[in-house]
Image (cartoon, grey):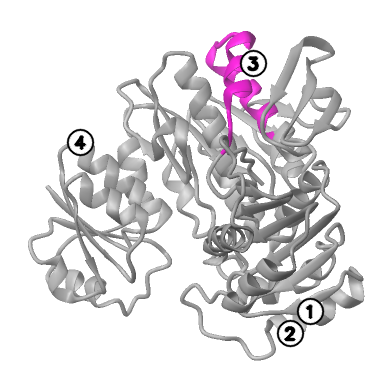
């Protein structure tokens, strides 16, 4: 069986490619540009072209695409013209999980971190799971692992409705929010998709959901499956008491239905990660894993790539990158940043997609209020065409009005030069966004090294999910 993946260098598609190669399948693919994930695929024996051409699908038994691939892609057209079966990424994920007891993690925010935590829990419990997620995690060997056990942990994708190809034994829902409004027409459609997902949990299965999310409460109350609720609300069955937030982590007393289970210590910052960890304590209960194993797994978890990932600390200047690109994620990340003893939080934000920026413009205007300075980059298109009136300049005007944070516009090259020249000890420089902005964090670290002629890269990188 030869599988060709269009957009093979993406975080989701590359994981599938790696799993297929580990299974012994022949894999080819294409993408617009080279990256580290593509180099990993080549090292495992995959064939990858840079650039798209109809000739690339020759000899393929099936072609896989994601919703980010244009219908006009020449490889997609060629496959259909030649009668080669064309499958969506979500169908291949469901195929890989078939026959396993599946834990599916969904929600608008926190999916990758929660999936990673769940993967570490099942590894610690000796279940050797298959894991597929949308971030690279060192402890899991990247963004996918082919375990030999009968359990799968899958990060779902609601952005195109493909989460509905899964039929989980256990589902975790972290929250529901206004997101992916380029696919969903309104909040009602978002709720309908998540409700359908909850109903796909096996009849004897379990739904674990955060009751703090007001929209998710509606789904939890309507779903007929067995449930465990978690959160900081009084109604939550599983909650955290006596929370202590510190730079780079937290600790809390875990309580189940009024009974204390023990203390959980996390090496990732922010209240949002306390909530993510509660979901995994709920998963341990669902899987019959003792609390001490969950304690240890969560205590060992050091995070996922691009989730509050510290790139380096040089002469008192800390450089961090984070994947946060939705207003709720940005605010959570800034709250986590405030637990560090920084004198000044300087935030560099690259808006992701014209459609997301348009739909959430007002919320973007107020979500940067915890920053001391905001520098906006041009919108990262992610294959979208520009929308008239949707610009970083317009976002800058709203931030000035609603957050009253000093804000300016810069180019990617210009912002690195600016920060390299005017950063001071006590600065926490936070690069935010789902596009190419993360690469700038590494460039700044190198510039700071050259500026100072010295510097102390961190020996251990702390990370956190948003």
Q: Which residue is mark 1?
A: 396
Residue 106 in sight in this render:
no
Q: Compared with residue 105, is residue 134 higher up or lower down, i.e. above or below?
A: below
The label shown at residue 23 is 4
Viewer-nearest of discs 1 and 4: 1
Residues packed near mark 2 inside 10 Å, few (<14), some (14 to 19) or many (20 plus): some
How many numbered discs, if any? Answer: 4
Quick check: is 181 in the magenta stretch?
no
Marks 1 and 4, how far apart at CA: 49 Å
Quick check: is 279 in the magenta stretch?
yes
Q: Secondary structure at mark 2?
A: helix
- Contact (CB < 8 A) between labels 2 and 1? yes
Pick the residue in front: 5 or 324: 324
For marks 1 and 4, the one nearer the N-term is 4
Q: Secondary structure at mark 3?
A: helix
Q: Which residue is mark 2?
A: 393
Residue 297 image-quadrant placement: top right
- Contact (CB < 8 A) between labels 1 and 4? no
Residues packed near mark 3 inside 10 Å, few (<14), some (14 to 19) or many (20 plus): many
Viewer-nearest of discs 2 and 4: 2
């Amino acid at each position: 069986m030869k599988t060709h993946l269009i957009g093979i260098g993406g975080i989701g598609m590359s994981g599938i490619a790696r799993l297929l190669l580990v299974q012994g399948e022949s894999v080819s693919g294409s993408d617009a540009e080279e990256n580290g994930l593509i180099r990993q695929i080549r090292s495992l024996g995959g064939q990858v072209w840079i650039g798209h051409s109809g000739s690339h699908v020759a000899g393929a038994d099936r072609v896989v695409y994601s919703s980010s691939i244009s219908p006009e892609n020449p490889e997609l057209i060629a496959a259909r013209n030649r009668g080669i079966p064309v499958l969506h990424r979500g169908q291949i994920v469901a195929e890989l999980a078939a026959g396993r007891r599946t834990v599916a993690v969904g929600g608008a925010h926190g999916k990758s971190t929660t999936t990673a935590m769940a993967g570490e829990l099942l590894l610690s419990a000796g279940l050797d799971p298959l894991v597929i997620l949308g971030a690279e995690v060192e402890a899991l060997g990247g963004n996918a692992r082919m375990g030999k056990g009968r359990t799968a942990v899958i990060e779902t994708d609601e952005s195109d409705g493909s989460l509905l190809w899964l039929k989980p034994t256990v589902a975790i829902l972290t929250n529901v929010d206004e997101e992916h409004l380029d696919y969903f027409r309104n909040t009602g459609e978002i709720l309908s998709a998540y409700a359908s997902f909850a109903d796909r949990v096996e009849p004897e299965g379990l739904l674990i959901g955060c009751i703090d999310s007001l929209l998710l409460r509606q789904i939890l109350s309507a779903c007929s499956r067995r449930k465990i609720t978690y959160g900081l609300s009084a109604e939550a069955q599983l909650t955290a008491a006596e929370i202590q937030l510190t730079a780079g982590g937290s600790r809390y007393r875990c309580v189940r239905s009024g009974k204390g289970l023990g203390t959980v210590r996390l090496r990732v910052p922010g209240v949002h990660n306390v909530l993510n960890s509660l979901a995994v304590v709920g998963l341990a209960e669902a899987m019959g894993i003792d609390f001490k194993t969950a304690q240890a797994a969560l205590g060992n978890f050091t995070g996922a790539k691009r989730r509050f990932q510290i790139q380096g600390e040089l002469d008192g200047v800390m450089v961090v990158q984070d994947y946060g690109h939705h207003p709720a994620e940005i605010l959570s990340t800034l709250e986590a940043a405030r637990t560090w003893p920084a004198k000044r939080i300087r935030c560099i934000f690259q808006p992701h997609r014209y459609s997301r920026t348009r739909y959430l413009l007002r919320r973007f205007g107020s979500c940067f209020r915890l920053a001391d300075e905001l520098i906006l980059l041009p919108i990262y298109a992610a294959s979208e065409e520009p929308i008239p009136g949707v610009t970083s300049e317009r976002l800058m005007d709203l931030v000035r009005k609603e957050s009253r944070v000093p804000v300016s516009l810069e180019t990617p090259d210009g912002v690195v030069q600016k920060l390299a020249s005017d950063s001071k000890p006590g600065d926490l420089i936070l690069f935010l966004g789902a596009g190419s902005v993360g690469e700038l964090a590494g460039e700044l670290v190198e510039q700071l090294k050259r500026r100072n002629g010295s510097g102390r890269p961190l020996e251990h990188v702390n990370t956190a999910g948003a």
